[in-house]
Image (tube, rainbow, N blue to C red):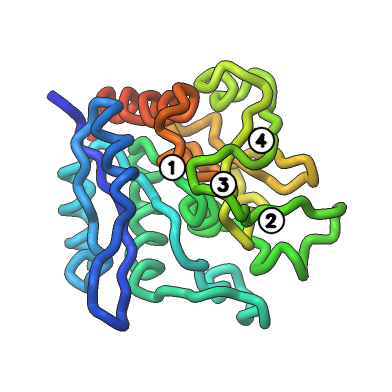
Amino acid sequence: MRPIIGITCDYDWQVDNFLLQSSYAEGICRAGGLPLIIPPISSCTTVEGMSDILSKIQGLLLTGGQDVHPRYYGEEPHVAIGRVNPHRDDLELPICQAAVEAGMPIFGICRGVQLMNIALGGDAYQDLKTQYNDGDLICHSQSAPKWAPYHHVSIKEESRLHQILGTYQIDTNSFHHQAVRNLAYGLEPVAWAADGVIEAIESESHPFLIGVQWHPERMLEDPRMMRLFEAFVEAAASYKS
């Protein structure tokens, strides 16, 4: 039986629409999973609602989107922060925490990697251009097609990410102005851009907990990007609640 993968989605409060780039679901389907979109509505954010959701899925995919509100790591909004979405924060932070506690496979993409770190006690740069002081920044928001590789990412030897991708360096796309800053306990950085910005994190103690800063769902024709989805779905297939 194909594992069911819960996929978080965006919510546009101005037009009252749920939004999800179709390539997230496409990546899950190509990898052998069945996507189940989790809407950020009040009935899903209750303890009972989240318990019901987690009982029906075998993996959780945290997708890209707006900035996580900095109140969740004890800061006021920076002048350069982007749009925040309380509907998403109210759902995704606690459901991520619950999925981690359950040992469920979790894959975070862009906002997803930042949210994963924040949910577990870490924080984020609210805006790289104004807050990153550890070197000269490269461009992290490309003016190029979304599927186009844009900058190099170096991967830690013998990390789980390295085992999945089979390489120490990969060219990725890039669309973000925030990034992981201080890591939550139990997480480790396993990939970096040339300027030192963290591009991927994982947990050695969790069955499958990986987050990447780039957008592999936009690069599905690259076999290495598909390996991320395949490894995630494979882990979900083995998950026992």
Q: Residue at x 40, y 68 (%)?
A: 89
- Foreground disc of the pair 1, 2: 1
**Kind of residue indicated by mark 4:** Ala
Q: Earlier in the sequence, mark 2 or mark 4?
A: 2
Q: In the image, which disc is placed on residue 181? A: 2
Q: Earlier in the sequence, mark 2 or mark 3?
A: 2
Q: CB under 8 Å between callouts 2 and 3?
A: no
Residue 45 showing in the rendered view: no
- Quadrant of image for the C terminus: top left
- Foreground disc of the pair 2, 4: 4
Q: Earlier in the sequence, mark 3 or mark 4?
A: 4
- Quadrant of image for the N terminus: top left
Query: Mark 1 — residue?
Result: 218
Left/right placement of residue 10 relative to residue 190 reads left
How far is the residue under mark 1 from the one under mark 3? 13 Å
Query: Mark 4 — residue?
Result: 191
Q: Give the farthest residue toward the front.
A: 144
Q: Residue at x 33, y 38 (%)?
A: 104
Query: Mark 3 — residue?
Result: 213
Q: Earlier in the sequence, mark 4 or mark 1?
A: 4
How far is the residue under mark 2 from the one under mark 3? 12 Å
Quarter of the rendering containing residue 161: top right
Q: In the image, which disc is placed on residue 157? A: none
Q: Name above or below for residue 42 compared with residue 189.
A: below
Quarter of the rendering containing residue 55: top left
How far is the residue under mark 3 from the one under mark 4? 9 Å
